[in-house]
Image (cartoon, rainbow, N blue to C red):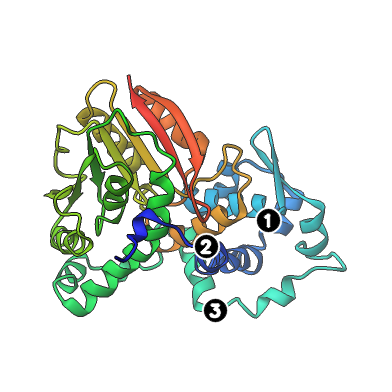
């Protein structure tokens, strides 16, 4: 009888393969700062706060925050009292006039489409693909098997590693029902009930992904334990009757205001004592790394309205709503989960 992959794990670590994709545009963000903004030459003479940097270069706070986190993680800047300064490495190699200035080496990237995309995001605050994104076209494409199949496979292949790694670190022995918010193919719900057989789960997804989820869950053999509830996580009230919510790899697609809205919806729908699991890649509280997370945040900044949120930001958002922070643990390939309880 074949082994259920949700109850096993690979013998080797796929982190280098994940990182190859996750970090693919981080260098373009560095190049945009170097050759289009001459950022390091200016900062060498004007140590500044995030707000002052945004004002001087006329760039937006979300992508600038991502940029500063990346530069911090790369050892190119430091922060003291909210003011950013260059390190010796960047003073020697990224400031015009230095005998070791590398700016000409990066100038060949100036007109690279991905570098120009990063410059656009910095200046507009919107994803580089914002102007061409058509939600209706995407929804129609999801009705086609040639698009829906690969899309579901992309979610599943990552979740097969991440889901079990998260599930085995969680103690859900006192929980009965899990709501998987924007759960995509249902891979995380399946992983949770595989590890915690007493649990039932429901994937909360909008059309047409709800249909894709049902098919994927059935194919994995978990239809008796995992259902699908159709709805929009922003527009609709969240279903009640669940004592634990899972928001996995969702918040990083959205800016601060929508993130706060989703967390508030979770708080409103959970019973007293209910738990929220936020599974994602997180920046540390100091916003100095890890480098992998900072690189991935650059990718998210480029293609979504979001970024990787820091532990400090998440602690503040949850605390303001009345959640009690109860746990934070790494899972696999640079990801981690936050566990919070509704007081």
- For residue 74, the mark is 1
Q: For this rendering, which residue is in front, 40 or 93?
A: 93
Q: Is residue 174 left or right of residue 72?
A: left
Whether pointer 3 and pointer 1 mark residues with C-beta atoms closer than 8 Å, the reply is no
Residue labelled with disc 2:
11
The structure residue drawn at horizontal position 45% and vertical position 52%, both measured from the top left corner, is 307
Q: Quadrant of residue 51?
A: top right
| Residue farthest to the right, as pictured | 99
Q: For this rendering, which residue is in front, 255 or 176?
A: 176
Residue labelled with disc 3:
112
Residues at marks 2 and 1, CA–CA distance in whole angstroms: 30 Å
Asked if 101 appears above or below 202 in the picture, the reply is below
Circle 1 sits in a helix, a strand or a loop, which is it?
loop
The structure residue drawn at horizontal position 58% and vertical position 56%, both measured from the top left corner, is 292
Q: Percent position (x, y) of residue 313? A: 48, 36
Q: Percent position (x, y) of residue 3? A: 34, 62
Asked if 86 appears above or below 118 in the picture, the reply is above
Q: Local crowd at mark 1 within 10 Å, few (<14), some, or many (≥20)?
A: some
Of the residues under marks 3 and 1, which one precedes in the sequence?
1
Circle 2 sits in a helix, a strand or a loop, which is it?
loop
Mark 2, mark 1: which one is toward the viewer?
Answer: 2
């Amino acid at each position: 009888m074949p082994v259920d992959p949700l109850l096993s794990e690979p013998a080797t670590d796929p982190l280098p393969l994940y990182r190859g994709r996750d970090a693919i545009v981080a260098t373009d963000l560095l190049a945009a700062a170097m050759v289009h903004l001459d950022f390091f030459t200016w900062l060498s003479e004007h140590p500044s706060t995030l707000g002052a940097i945004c004002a001087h270069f006329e760039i937006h706070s979300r992508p600038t925050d991502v940029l500063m986190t990346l530069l911090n993680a790369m050892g190119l800047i430091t922060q003291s009292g909210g003011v950013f300064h260059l390190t010796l490495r960047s003073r020697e190699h990224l400031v015009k006039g230095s005998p070791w200035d590398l700016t000409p080496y990066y100038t060949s990237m100036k007109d690279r489409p991905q570098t120009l995309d990063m410059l656009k995001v910095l200046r507009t605050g919107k994803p580089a693909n914002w102007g061409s994104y058509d939600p209706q076209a995407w929804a129609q494409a999801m009705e086609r098997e040639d698009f829906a199949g690969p899309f579901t496979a992309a979610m599943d292949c990552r979740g097969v590693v991440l889901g079990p790694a998260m599930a085995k670190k969680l103690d859900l022995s006192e929980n009965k029902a899990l709501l998987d918010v924007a759960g995509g193919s249902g891979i995380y719900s399946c992983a949770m009930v595989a590890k915690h057989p007493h649990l039932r789960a429901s994937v909360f997804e909008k059309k047409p992904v709800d249909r894709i989820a049902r098919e994927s869950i059935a194919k994995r053999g978990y239809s008796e334990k995992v259902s699908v509830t159709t709805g929009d996580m922003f527009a609709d009230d969240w279903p009640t009757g669940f004592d634990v919510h899972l928001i996995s790899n969702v918040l990083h697609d959205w800016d601060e205001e929508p993130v706060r809205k989703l967390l508030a919806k979770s708080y409103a729908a959970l019973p007293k004592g209910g738990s929220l699991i936020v599974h994602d890649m997180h920046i540390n509280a100091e916003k100095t790394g890890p480098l992998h997370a900072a690189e991935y945040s650059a990718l998210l900044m480029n293609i979504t309205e979001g970024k990787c949120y820091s532990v400090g930001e998440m602690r503040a958002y949850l605390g303001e709503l009345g959640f009690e922070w109860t746990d934070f643990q790494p899972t696999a390939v640079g990801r981690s989960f936050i566990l919070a309880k509704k007081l």
